[in-house]
Amino acid sequence: MRSEEIRPATAADVPAVKAVTDAAYTPYVERIGRAPLPMGADHAANVAAGKVYVTGDPAGGAVAGLVVVEAFADHLFLDSIAVRPDARGSGVGRRLLHFVEAHARALGLPEVRLYTHVLMWENQKIYPRYGYELVGRRVDGPYERLHYRKRLD
């Protein structure tokens, strides 16, 4: 896979999807006191449902990042974005966020929505840089989340 290519994940990608997701989210387990939800996702079901898109690393080849998205009538929900730790800072996350916006536009959806745990403070710096606005804070079971949206032109 070329590094700039973002494509739907296939069944063959499921082990890499799990590995990248676990590697990206494991550092948060101790901080938030439990595994973030993406770590427990049914990756095979998400891939089969067409919700997962993957991209390669800058050197080409292996899955370096992925997004899990779900289309609703009025928005595209970005359920998860994960970048392999050794690929951080190489533009993988930026490409994935741009892809999500382009995908929403292609589906005729006016906005992208997402949430992040309040203790994942790194994300609170990243999303506003890409035009996401904080629209709420809610507790969903054991997770306290900040909800963001980005309206598309």
Image: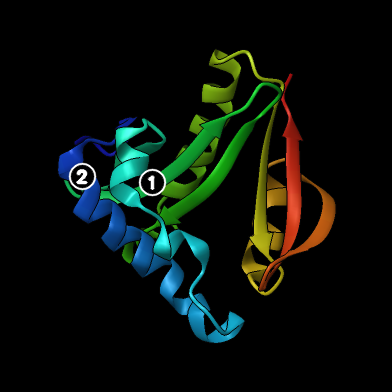
Residue type (three-letter) at the residue carrying disc 2: Asp
In this orientation, does residue 60 appear? no
Q: Is residue 152 above or below residue 94?
A: above
Local SS, label 1: strand
Q: Secondary structure at mark 2?
A: helix
Mark 1 vs mark 2, CA separation in Å? 10 Å
Q: Residue at x 63, y 70 (%)?
A: 120
The tag earlier along the polypeptide, 1 or 2, is 2
Residue 113 at x, y percent in the picture:
68, 39
- Please tell me which residue is depicted at 68% across the width and 68% down the height of the picture: 141
Of badges 1 and 2, nearer the viewer stands 2
Q: Which residue is mark 1?
A: 66
Taking the view exactly as shown, the residue that stands out farthest to the front is 141
- Measuring from the top left, give residue 98's x and y in whole percent: 54, 33
The count of marks equals 2
Q: Could you tell me which residue is drawn at 74 percent across and 47 percent down?
A: 148
Check disc 2: other Cα within 10 Å, few if <14, some if 14-19, many if 20+. Answer: some
* Disc assigned to residue 101: none
Crowding around mark 1 (Cα neighbors within 10 Å: few <14, some 14 to 19, many 20+) is many
Q: Nearer the viewer, residue 23 or 137?
A: 137
Amino acid tagged 1:
Leu
Quadrant (top left, top right, bottom left, bottom right) of the N terminus: top left
Q: Nearer the viewer, residue 4 or 97?
A: 97
> Disc 2 marks which residue?
13
Q: Where is residue 16? Give x, y as percent.
A: 23, 54
Q: Please tell me which residue is depicted at 71% across the width and 61% down the height of the picture.
A: 124
